[in-house]
Image (tube, rainbow, N blue to C red):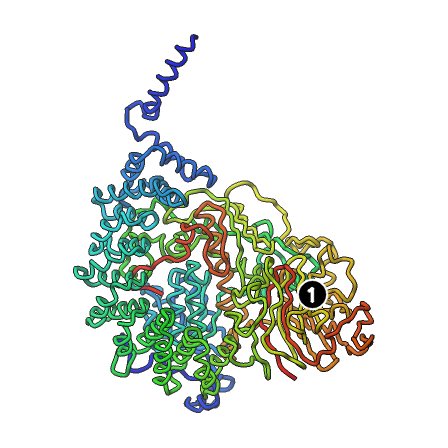
Amino acid sequence: MRPKDVRMIAWCCFALLPFALFAADGAPAAGVKDLVAALPAAKAADGQAIAAKIVALGPEAIETICGMLADPETGGDAKARFALHGLALYVTRPNAEAERAMFAGKVLEALAAEGRPEVKAFLVEQLQLAGKDEAVDALGKLLCDDRLGDPAALALTRIGTPKAAAALAGALGAAKDRRLVAIVQALGVLRAQGAAKDLLALAKRGDPTLHRTALRAIANIGDASGAEVLAKAAGPDGDADRAFATDQLILFARRRAEAGAKDECAKICRDVIAAQDDAGEAHVVCAALRTMAYGVGADAKNDIIRKTQSENTIIRETAKSLAVRCGMMPDEEGFTCLFNGEDLTGWTGSVKGYLVEDGKIICLKRGGGNLYIDKEYGDFVFRFEFKLTSGANNGLGIRAEKGKDAAYHGMELQILDDTADMYKNLQPYQYHGSIYGVVPVKRGHQRPLGQWNVQEVIAKGPHIQVILNGEKVIDADLDAYIEMKDGVPQSKTDHRAHPGIKNPKGYIGFLGHGAHVEFRNIRIKEL
Amino acid sequence: MVRQGISRRAFLARSAAAAAAWTVVPRHVLGAGQPAPSETIAHAIIGVGGMGMGHVGYVKNDPIGRLLAVCDVDAQHLARGVKAGGCEGHEDFREVLDRGDIDVVHVVTPPHWHALIAVAAANAGCDVWCEKPMTRTIGEGKYVIDAVRRNARVFRLNTWFRLHSGLYGLGCEAKPLKKLIEAGLLGWPLTVRVTPSTGFGWKLGMWSGRTNAKPEPVPAHFDYDMWLGPAPYKPYFAHRTHGSFRGYWDYDGGGLADMGQHYLDPVQYLLDKDDTSPVEIEALAPWPPHPDAVGLWGRVEMTYADGCKIILESGEWGDPIDPDPPYIEGPKGKVFKGFRTEPADLKDALATLPDPAPMISEFNISVKTRRPFGLNEGNGNRSNMLVHLANAAIRTGRKLRFDTVAELFVGDDEANRLVDQPMRAPWTL
């Protein structure tokens, strides 16, 4: 065949290709229906490829599938529901905004043209996944509809933009009963600052459900304007359900603290605590204490410590556990918490090499360095927990001089993953728990890698003990391991000078050597 | 019923001073061997369907438990529960919490109500005994933890396999496995396989939802609107509710959510992962999922940062599964169904190994001493999250990465929509 003919045939095929997608009866929908019939697919990748093909067929394909929906009385549209839901999931993947917009646009068109309430509800549910600001106007118009008001309010909550919040607020005037409650709730969930004042008026209305929902929303929004209505509701002349109102007031206090109004938070919590004089509302006192502890921090210390002396067991125990968690009080008899679980307050040195997360101090792999407690200790019991990663190398410096190598200017208690291959040929005075270079450790008591270990260090004059996971692995009189050479202490074990080993006091800290190690539950008792 | 007066509940501390405030009934008035009311613990059960009737039995069989009330939105279930419990009945859980005389509230509704009722119960000063899965979504868990701790309550889930009892078809309990692991005899990291081959059936077919059900009239004795509560309204048909609600995403999560915490909580305990979650989750399942009805899946793999893995296989969809894989596999040893081990003599070490850290395994002790139950709101929420992480991978059809501190998926807004799902008004956390 001549090249020109080939090109002609190729062009005809190309031009006719769109028609090939149509069934013999000429309906454009057939290709779509075959694709829909193939869902769900046995593999997620195949299912997503089918979704991609449907999207590639363009807006008419979406329109066709919407047209396949039936109301539940009729049924038979399971495949169409799989497909539309799958498409909503597919087009909301990252970097597919144009597809999402196309899909949402067609769903909105179908919604506008649709008469059957259950089908409309299903379409709104897909907008809960795939809708953005383009859907807000249409959804706003549904807020007063008995069947569609709830799904529309949820969709606007999901969209969550200022435009969505404005649409919700805009419907407050016309909505009634459950519709109004749904809108107020959505505004509270979205923490829509702009609606704060409207909600104050609604909180004063008679309907108890509306009142509760409004109080909750006002509390969650946390705008200063809400203080009065919440305090009144929780007060002696306030709500019949004073406990609920008080819960909202405590939530409001938390939000005020988050907004920077810590003094206001403290005052609200103190007033709540003062109002609960009898033992009847111990749990409210606890809630207020906890809100103060986390919202206000150190300024709440006196309030919390005072409640550790409460006659009420529940309040006392809660206050004590808060004091411990927040570094305000010893957890064991005579012990002081050195790490508040939240940040490196009280620590100094290489603070940038460590991270606080989830109640732990984490030595970063690309960080580390020496992190000291900002106080010197002489004789003490030091307790902590640690978790290692493969090959980890760290150390606990004690009686150390800041800014110097703690192993020699103080002591370093080795922290090491003993099981690592690269450490298989170390000296006994180099393994975990050893006083590095000086006192060898009794090995074999580390927990398997990845588990938390418990360690205690007792330092009394020259007598050092290390207890690892309940087993005493070091019980040493330093004097037995040291000899003086030219007035400088030298280890009889590694034959090196350890000038600081006889320091009567010094700093305690973690000595990061470039490995990820986690620490928690750090406390000390001075002897 | 409107809440009365100043306080929701006269909250009495368990201290000597407070005990004097009780009118203590002398033992001889009660009859020999009866605990005095001040020594007994008062229970209420919210939700007396199938599982709820089981809870009636728990309290009845507890020598210091007194069942004071049951609650249900189905009048027939309620009547049955009142009769079996010999106690009062309520239609609305808020009335139960208003009573002021309940120590422990059992939350035995479908999961979409768990968080709301558990939080309300804790706020009302009650301890909580909650069915599994602890919550319907990942996002709800933190509210339960917060409410329980703010109110200094104790919380337990209705599962117990990390504490005692044989692990289903596996052929042993968690304790000996924990001892082997803690002694390092299996090495680290570990992979655990939870499949019918290792003794764990997922019941997917049983708990699949219907995609073609026609609406039915709501029975007169059933308050469907209240049963739905925070779940979106959908036209009623019986299969949505009562014995088969597990088949619908709006209320639960299929067989995975049904058995998930029973099977996976002990695994989490064995792997010492109570304070963290997997960082990578991937599933093999049909896609897309149905928006309403839970379907089948074949496999889910969850990987922790330290390399530990949990692999779920259903055997009810997808490729055939390995008939005899190890239940636990580590670099130094394996444990198979029937407590067969490699090396074969691994079990011999058990006699000399120390016991794992003790845990409170009797809820009454937690209630009386106020010390956390062995399976509580904290570690229970982490195993609850395992269930929902798996379902998220199934529903999105993608490999997911999870931030274990923020408790959100990394770079996946769509998966995060499953984490925090707004509730139907007026219900909210």
Q: How many marks?
A: 1
What is the chain letter for disc 1? A
Whole-percent x, y for residue A208 in the image? 24, 71
**How crowded is the residue under tag 1: few (<14 C-alpha within 10 Å), some, or many (20+)?**
many
Q: Nearer the viewer, residue B238 or B144?
A: B144
- The residue tagged 1 is A446
| Quarter of the figure with the C terminus of chain A | bottom right
Whole-percent x, y for residue B347 in the image? 71, 60
Looking at this rendering, what residue extends furthest in the top direction?
A: A2
Whole-percent x, y for residue A254 in the image? 37, 72
Residue A40 occupies quadrant = top left
Looking at this rendering, what residue extends furthest in the left direction?
A: A174
Which residue is found at the position 50% from the left and 81% from the top? Answer: A320
Q: B59 left or right of A502?
A: left
Residue A467 occupies quadrant = bottom right
Looking at this rendering, what residue extends furthest in the front direction?
A: A486
Q: A6 left or right of A331?
A: left
Q: Is residue B161 visible?
A: no
Secondary structure category for the residue under label 1: loop
Which residue is found at the position 64% from the left and 79% from the top? Answer: A377
Which residue is found at the position 59% from the left and 57% from the top? Answer: A366
Q: Is residue A284 visible?
A: yes
Q: Nearer the viewer, residue A164 or B324?
A: A164
What amino acid type is highlighted by mark number 1? Gln
Q: A189 left or right of B272?
A: left
Above-or-below relation of A524 to B23: above
Q: Nearer the viewer, residue B426 or A165?
A: A165
Above-or-below relation of A506 to A48: below
Above-or-below relation of A217 to A463: above
Whole-percent x, y for residue A149 in the image? 24, 55
| Quarter of the figure with the N terminus of chain A | top left
